[in-house]
Amino acid sequence: MGGTEFKEVDKLPSHTEVFNVPEKPPLKDLLFKVYGPAMIILGVGLGGGEFLTGPVAFVRYGMYIFYFTIITIFFQYVYNLYCLHYTIATGEPVLVGLRRINVVVPFIVLAVMLTWIGFPGWIAATGTMGAWITLGRLPTQQDFWTVTYPWIVVLIILAFLLVASGRKIERTLEIVQWILAPLMLIIVTILAIVLTPFSIWVEAFQGFIGYNPNTGTPIAYFPSDVNWLTMAAYIVSPAFAMGLNLLIMNWYRDKGYGMSAKVGYIPALIGGKKVTLSPEGYIAKPTEENINTFKKWVRIARGEHIWIFFLGNLLGMLFPALIWRSSLPLGTAVGGFAGAAAISQGVLETYGYFFAWLITISGFLILFTTFVGILDLFTRVFTDTIWSVSKRVRESRIIKNDVRRLYYLILGIYVIWAFYATTIAAPLILIQISFSNLAIATVIAVPFVMYLIRRKLPKPYQPPKWMDIINILFIIYALWLAINVIGFQLGLIK
């Protein structure tokens, strides 16, 4: 399917119809009926950048580089809303919509995505924290096969069972993240308040603008002896996945935002039922009523992104970073097979067993729920793309027009790969490589998304032009990172 025209329908579903809420939903309805995908994004993001790659960079270079967190989250905030204009208007995830440029384009993005999500370092990092619980010390390479890897195997199986349960997979993930993400944020906030010295708080707030009094840098401090793998993994990690955030539109489709309510969703294996998932989206006639309904959907998405996505991810980076920075000496290069467990040992040696166990359990749950989200995301974006592109696959004797069959076939392949991929490098290295590749992915993906929305989406539903300017700056920002990461990996930059 490479068509460029949408099927036109008379009416765009409203949020009152989709979620059975009043025109102006009360806070309770907003939180537990209307909002949701941003909480999945927050929960998944916490275990990648906020709890691990960001704090690793802050321990090494100080909190003076925190301003990158604000820049990266802002770019993604604008980019996400840009993408949501497309999914709300058409019911298509942006990745699926890219086939309207050319059927090859979604697979180019998927190939780029594999450099990020294809190496499941998140579950390996969870395993290192499990190993610390078992051993009461930092796990080493010698402990990998006897302690760390058994934890990894059990956790991968548990993640599979979670993704397989419930009526709608997106709703299952939403419930998990609504329970765990706020709980983990509360715990790390309390720990940061209790454990962090005043001097580190001052350093953190200086980092909001990049002021470093030690070097006399008034704004935008940047270390001179930078390890670009560590630095880039931090800079791209706040919030979610930079330019690959187009992938999260699949969760908004399954939630039912806008025209998505007419398209369908991916049901779960256990507790779900066969649901018709349209391989393509629709577009509502640009009547005054439909355009007003569309604008209300955009306002809902903007509210969710301000309070949950932007603010949640900002605090999600700040508080774990304060704990890491308070527990490990400045200049510490965290790495090897200890990975995320380094914070457990650091807190143990600085503050004692009680706080060490508290941060370990919190980190364990944060990293595990991240992998659950990644497991679903990897599977659903491949499922959606193949489902939308290939009628032959949909009607094959194996799939039988049941999207669940395709979803769980791909899920099974990824689970098998994860059992192997977690053994090929140290957990932290897997995550740093994955994140550093996001800069390159952004340079490739964002121009495709801009072209799709400006050339294929009807003008009444297009985002404002100022968003294009922000997206161009986003590409330049990512290009700067990509050049330095590639140069560093090739040995051209020391």
Image: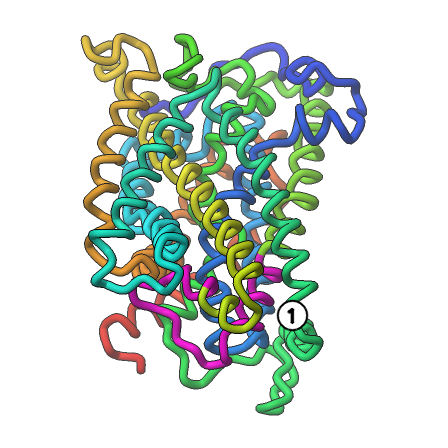
Could you say which is closer to the camera, residue 370 or residue 66?
A: 370
Residue 211 seen in this snapshot: yes
Quadrant the C terminus occupies: bottom left
Is-magenta flag for residue 343? yes
Residue 444 seen in this snapshot: no
Q: Quadrant of residue 97?
A: top left
Q: Quadrant of residue 426?
A: bottom left
Name which residue lies at 24% across and 77% down.
491
Taking the image as shown, residue 197 lies to the left or right of residue 384, namely right
Residue identified by numbered label 1:
196
Expressed as whole percent of the image width and height from the top left, the position of residue 146 reads 22, 52
Taking the image as shown, residue 311 lies to the left or right of residue 253, namely right
Q: Is residue 19 above or below residue 250?
A: above
Q: Badge 1: how crowded within 10 Å, few (<14), some, or many (20+)?
A: some
Name which residue lies at 69% across and 31% down.
31
The figure's colour scheme reads rainbow
Could you say which is closer to the camera, residue 49 or residue 347?
A: 347
Name which residue lies at 31% across and 40% down.
110
Is-magenta flag for residue 205? no
Q: Secondary structure at mark 1?
A: loop
Could you say which is closer to the camera, residue 483 or residue 188?
A: 188
Report the amino acid beneath label 1: Thr
The residue stretch that appears in magenta:
317-344
Quadrant the N terminus occupies: top left
Expressed as whole percent of the image width and height from the top left, the position of residue 90 reads 52, 24
Q: Quadrant of residue 34?
A: top right
Expressed as whole percent of the image width and height from the top left, the position of residue 277 reads 41, 14
Expressed as whole percent of the image width and height from the top left, the position of residue 481 reads 41, 67
Name which residue lies at 46% across and 41% down.
369
